[in-house]
Amino acid sequence: MRNITFATNHPLVLTGARRVGEPEPVDVLVRDGRVSAIGASLGVDPRTERVALDGRFVVPGLWDAHTHLTQWALARRRLDVSGARSAAEAVALVARRVAADPPPDGLPLVGAGFRDALWPDAPTAALLDEVTGDVPVVLVSGDLHCAWASTAGLRFLGVTHPTGLLRESEWLPLQGVVDHVPDDVADELVADALHAAAARGVVGVVDLEIADNLAVWRRRPTPPVRVRAGVWEDYLDRVVREDLHTGDRVADLVEQGPFKVITDGSLNTRTAYCHDAYPGTTNHGVLSVPPERLVPLMGYARAHGLSCAIHAIGDAANAHVLDAFAATGATGSVEHAQLLTDADVARFADLGVVASVQPEHAMDDRDVADHHWAGRTGRAFAFGALHRAGVRLALGSDAPVAPLDPWAAIDAAVWRARDGRDAWHPEQRIDVLAALASSVDGRPLGLRVGDPADLAVLDADPLVLGASVGALRGMPVSGTLVAGRWAHRTL
Ligand SMILES: [Zn+2]
């Protein structure tokens, strides 16, 4: 039941389009949502809309293989107040945001990251009230242990407080209140987030939000880009009852995604499940879904036409997950795959399991890895080894953990460097073509007649930008087509 539909729309031809690594420009004809011809100076019907690319680059549109969309949509609205060196500076940041981009009616402006320990002035509700009036404002501290609210913000939280600075037990029970958003508001914020993604050349995302994603995506209006919505064990029954297989249409531009299971923890919390103990301890991490549960789950998913996306971060967890892929014959991906033995790198290739990796996490966590995985980091975030072994990589952000922008992931995979630092294990770098190819859902970079017209138009040559560290992060994107329609266009 593979029945993705492509709305009929008027044909267009992209003229003077360059493809990465190819010297000669071509025309690309788009009809009925697909690439219908590629060639030099295509003769087309005069009614076909012509869009002159003048030598701009066309690549298959980008995918983010791992997102939590609702969480990301909320997080990207949060005001970053981490740079404030006083209460007055934080208030100035709030004032600017409220004037430029106030929160939707009935919702608070949420800010994050303030550190008041060394501030010369005291954060109070009254200070915020002077600039925010009736707009509820809640600022959460960098360590999450306190919050500073305006009077309207306190009202939103349902409390009264003498100063507006809620500490520890005053604040912790209220954390969930600022995360709760009515469905219609969440849906609007998600649409905004996907429009922003389209402006970076994104044509599709895998949504692994912990939610009843089938119900969520049937409720939402048609998204601007494709969504592959994963299913969790708690919601698996309905997907099976409706006989939805991975790849089946759920709604316009939305398809059933993989079955998601989390088998271990994370590096930062030292719960990633590893062969070796964490330094100075006997702790190997946590295997929350052991093989005797994982194998039947994956077998069940496979029997019902679902591919599997299995979270494994530590090397021992990855070994168990690869065993389970081998035992069940399931298809799919390991999500994160952060620490791997050499033998398991080869097993990824043998089993055809995709390594769904988030290169920005390597940049965020390199110091933590150097500490907690001391002596093992040569095989951490081993993109180079995986690529050389012939493993298919799928790059992603795990937004909101990292921002949803594939160019950041590509740059991190190519350079393994950020913030002016030296490359971290440069032997695990991959080249620009490999990083791009790992970001386009398996499509050939040179485009292919018959493929969906999911295309990104770039103002710069990725190979040229990719020669300078950090430059790919700023890749200018002037157009994004999804199924032959513009999801983003500045041309
Ligand atoms: Zn995730």
Image (spheres, grey):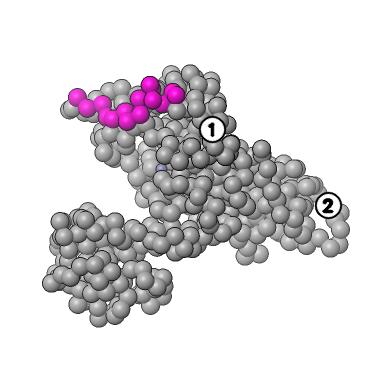
> Is the CB of mark 1 within 8 Å of ligand 1?
no
Image side of residue 373 versus residue 358, left or right: left
Circle 2 packing at 10 Å, graded few (<14), some (14-19), many (20+), is some
Quarter of the rendering occupied by the C terminus:
bottom right
Q: Quick check: 148 above or below 385?
A: below
Q: Residue at x 36, y 68 (%)?
A: 107
Q: Which residue is mark 1?
A: 307
- Provide the residue span drawn in magenta: 282-296
For label 2, the SS is loop
Circle 1 packing at 10 Å, graded few (<14), some (14-19), many (20+), is many
In contact (CB < 8 Å): disc 1 and disc 2: no
Q: Quick check: 458 above or below 303?
A: below
Tell me where residue 324 appears, x and y as whole percent: 45, 22
In the image shown, does 290 or 239 lie closer to the viewer?
239
Magenta residues: mostly which secondary structure? loop
Tell me where residue 372 appears, x and y as whole percent: 26, 33
Q: Amino acid at mark 2?
A: Leu
Quarter of the rendering occupied by the N terminus:
top right
In the image shown, does 326 or 183 lie closer to the viewer?
183
Tell me where residue 451 appears, x and y as whole percent: 70, 43
**Numbered badge on residue 42:** 2
Tell me where residue 299 appears, x and y as whole percent: 49, 25
Q: Residue at x 19, y 24 (%)?
A: 282
Can I make out residue 23 in this image? yes
For label 1, the SS is loop
Which of the two labelled residues, at mark 1 and mark 2, occupies the earlier sequence position? 2
Q: CA distance from mark 1 to mark 2?
A: 40 Å
